[in-house]
Amino acid sequence: MSDVLHISPVPELKHFLNKDNILEIVVRGKKKKFKYFQKVAFDKQPQGEEKKLLEKAVNLLEKGDSTLKKNTKLISQISKLQKFSIVLDGLNLCATCAGFAIMSKKLDELSTQINQIIGVVKAGHEVQADYEFKKVISEHSNMLDSRKTQKYYTEEEMRKLVDLEFNALNMMIDVFMKDLTEGADSLLFSIYSLASMLAVSLKYFDEQYYLNNKEAIKTGSVWHSSHDSWMAVYERLLDPQYIEKLQDHGSFVLKLSTLETDAYYQGLEAQVRDLVEDIKDNQTLVEVLESRELMSAFDDYVEENAAEDIKKAFEETGAMDNGEVARIYEETMKQVALAG
Amino acid sequence: MVAKQFIEETIFTMSESSIGTLKTRLIGPYLSCSFLDDNDISTTILAEKLCDYFEKVELNMDDDFDKAISKYMSYWDDLVDARIPKEPQAKKGSPAPEMPRPRKYYNLAIEHKNAENMTMTDIVDFSRIMMCLQTAVLQLSGNDKSETISDFDFSTKGFDLDAILASLKESLAEDKKPPIVPGFLKKVINPSQSGIYTFNTCTEIITVMMYAFITDAEMGE
């Protein structure tokens, strides 16, 4: 069992009428790690005995048969969606250098195609803003690298990155809605990758903005004045007309069954909701913890807890003795950024 | 497809809650037990009762379960077809107009209906699309039976089984009416066309089973 996170000064927490706010965020954070772990673990699709052991371990994690059965039934029906599984875990993959390296390789392969699509639409619609997809990936990668080397982007540099990703994402959603049927798969992959990248950038920006400016802001919102309009792009990804296009893409282009289409569009909807929740949770945390060091300690605390619980569940099944299961476990933990 | 496979792939994959819905809807109105109390009917017993029912339909109608599925799909097609916008005709020199969304999905459902080797996926997908389209029809405010729907909700959120069954029964009742014939050629209604072991009633039961199956398969979180 990991150490309890000590947050000081404790009196600061009394700002919150309901102390469960922070507990709720911890539990939610842990549950999301389990959920990503489940999705990625089942995507490996081991056969026979290994599959049974993996299912048993995941069952222990969730401590309930019905959730496992539902997930297994749906996941067994989304065999055609494996290429999108990496998108479903985009949140974690966009937040670390190692994870983003996996994503950016794929995104790099798509970037020429995406830039061409954007070029066609820009030419037809006299769009002023200049954003190329490759530039966005490169900037995001550079930002993560700066954090790794502790040469953090300034507040202004982060704001520019947020703006860049926000504008690119809006542009791509416009393109998708215009029914350009060629390249729709790549476009969708890029949309959800960008949505994850924007969430990561926005969280880092919010942290910086708050800590730099909280003393100076006397009244009104403590967040950047563009924050609401940045968040509005996520509403576009949940808009009924957009969702209809996703359903149509699943049914007629990917040729999924109705159940598979459900798993597909509901999975993408859930990912967007998770991203929004994460950004809002992060704002709550920034306000509570009020320091970069505590924020970092909190993130480590949630990850450590989740990693320990998952490891314990696997050890209880005796599944770790099985070479194939151990290999899947290690790979999965790395993909969801839970490995040390 | 044989009835046993159909039952295996539906009843035995559902949650307890959906099985409960099935028992409520089927035991009493369509199926009955002579000795067992309703509360004592397990999933296996329900499956056996359904198996017996379908067997009786096959004997009464002198046809196999494939025919029952085929009639189920035909009856649903009859119910929904008139309320779907027609395929737009392309005008000379103009780009082809966009096919209305309901028509796209209706055509997809008909592909499943016409599948050469009918699978469970064909039956489920056909049923899901038809129920979605019919739900949109039921939400139209007017009484004009020629009014078509412009769009529909792909999710199962708006499904109302009572309303769906009522509209299906109304449509099936129209199908049952004997043709008007001169007195001297008075049609004798074949006794096997009435009662519950008919394709009409079988259609209602398959509809209930499909509703329970489709609404059961939600994304686990």
Image (cartoon, coloured by chain):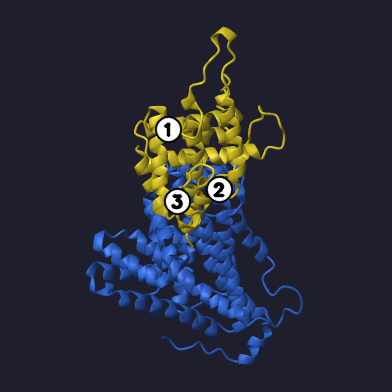
Chain colours: A blue, B yellow
Q: Secondary structure at mark 3?
A: loop
Q: Secondary structure at mark 2?
A: loop
Q: CA distance from mark 2 to mark 1?
A: 25 Å
Residue indicated by mark 1? B68
Question: Mark 3 belongs to which amino acid?
Answer: Phe
Q: Earlier in the sequence, mark 1 or mark 3?
A: 3
Most foreground residue, A180 or B145: B145
Residue at screen point 55% across, 73% down: A204
Most foreground residue, B27 or B84: B27
Give the mark toward the camera: 2 or 1: 1
Question: Mark 1 belongs to which amino acid?
Answer: Ala
- Res B201 label: none
Q: Secondary structure at mark 1?
A: helix
Residue indicated by mark 3? B35
A309 vs A194: above or below = below
Residue indicated by mark 2? B156
Q: CA distance from mark 1 to mark 3?
A: 29 Å
